[in-house]
Amino acid sequence: MREQTLRSWDKGPSSPQCCCTPNPAFLQELNKRLTVHASSLLHHLSSLMSPLLAGEPDTTTSFSCHHAAGGLSLHVKSELSGLPFYWDFHCCPAPPEMVSRHLLRPLIQMSLALQYQVQELTSLLLQKDAEIEDYRESGATLSRDRLRTEPFQEDTFQQNFLAESLPQICGAGEGQAFTSALQQLYVAVTQQEAKQNQKRRRSEDAEGLASAAETTGHPHPPSPSQENETAFSSEQTMPTSSPARKPQLPAAKAKPKKAKGLFS
């Protein structure tokens, strides 16, 4: 059975959101009779990897990772139309700006969101304890004693979490993946960041248009030299319909008049 090998190089991190589109010319070189659109290849690869990343076993598909000094290599074994189909991805180190945009900033925002969620849950527990205490003071009793709980103490809970739960979480190793709830939180955080960036760009564009319109409607006053030049040019280009101004002749000298007598 003929094996077909597909090799593509990715210039970004191994996250599916950051993968570049495979080079069709390179795919055609390795697979002479392969004719398929790049979007179809990505859709097929997503359908192969999504069940594996979700923890669902598949007998026909498997993948392995090999980390080296130059980057990360991902090898996927699958079948296509009953034939073995192999994928080899060679991922280069991502630039710091991409790592910050797709990893660091979303994780920081997720931590802040989870911290705010814990504060709200703590406040809700304290309110529930106050409600239960009010019932007890009113004479209410539990029908089943096993449902009785102690009042919530935030400091005690925090100490127990650091002493008992945290070592178990850290001891799970690096293979522990995000749960579905954390994946949904990551998607929500990235969507909110995209909306904020879009609003920021729109506001900046609106401010730029407003400043441009203000500059067009209220030009800067001309300098005195420009005013003189404008006045001189307006005198030279005066329309013909206006009444013509007579040239001023030099004043002639008045002739002395003879004195006239009463009987002359």
Image (cartoon, rainbow, N blue to C red):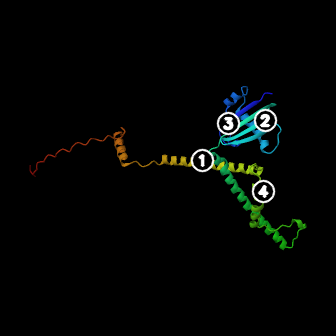
According to the image, label 1 marks what residue? 201
Between discs 1 and 3, the one toward the N terminus:
3
Residue at the image position 75 percent from the left and 30 percent from the top: 4
**Residue in the foreground of this view, choosing between 105 and 236:** 105
Q: Mark 4 falls on what kind of element? A: helix
> Mark 2 against mark 1, which lies toward the viewer?
2
**Furthest-right residue in view?**
143
Amino acid bearing label 2: Ser
Crowding around mark 3 (Cα neighbors within 10 Å: few <14, some 14 to 19, many 20+) is: some
Whichever of callouts 2 and 4 sits on the residue coming sooner in the sequence is 2
Closer to us: 245 or 212: 212
**Mark 4 and 1 residues: CB-CB less than 8 Å, in contact?**
no
Local crowd size for mark 4, using a 10 Å CA cut-off: few (<14), some (14–19), many (≥20): few
* Secondary structure type for disc 2: strand
- The label nearer to you, 1 versus 3, is 3
Single out the residue that lies furthest toward the top. Answer: 33
Q: Cα distance, mark 4 to mark 1?
A: 44 Å
Mark in the foreground, 2 or 4? 4
Q: Residue at image x 77%, y 40%?
A: 63
Give neighbour class at mark 1: few <14, some 14-19, many 20+ (Cα, 10 Å).
few
Q: Is mark 3 on a helix, strand or loop?
A: strand
Q: Which mark is residue 78?
A: 2
Q: Position of residue 191 (x, y in %)?
A: 69, 48
Question: Residue at the spot x=78%, y=35% of the render?
Answer: 78
Residue beneath disc 3:
9
Q: Quadrant of the N terminus?
A: top right
Looking at the rendered structure, the number of numbered marks drawn on it comes to 4
> Label 3 to label 4, Cα distance in Å?
38 Å
Measure how far apart labels 1 and 3 are at the Cα level.
Answer: 33 Å
Compared to residue 201, the image places residue 62 above or below, namely above
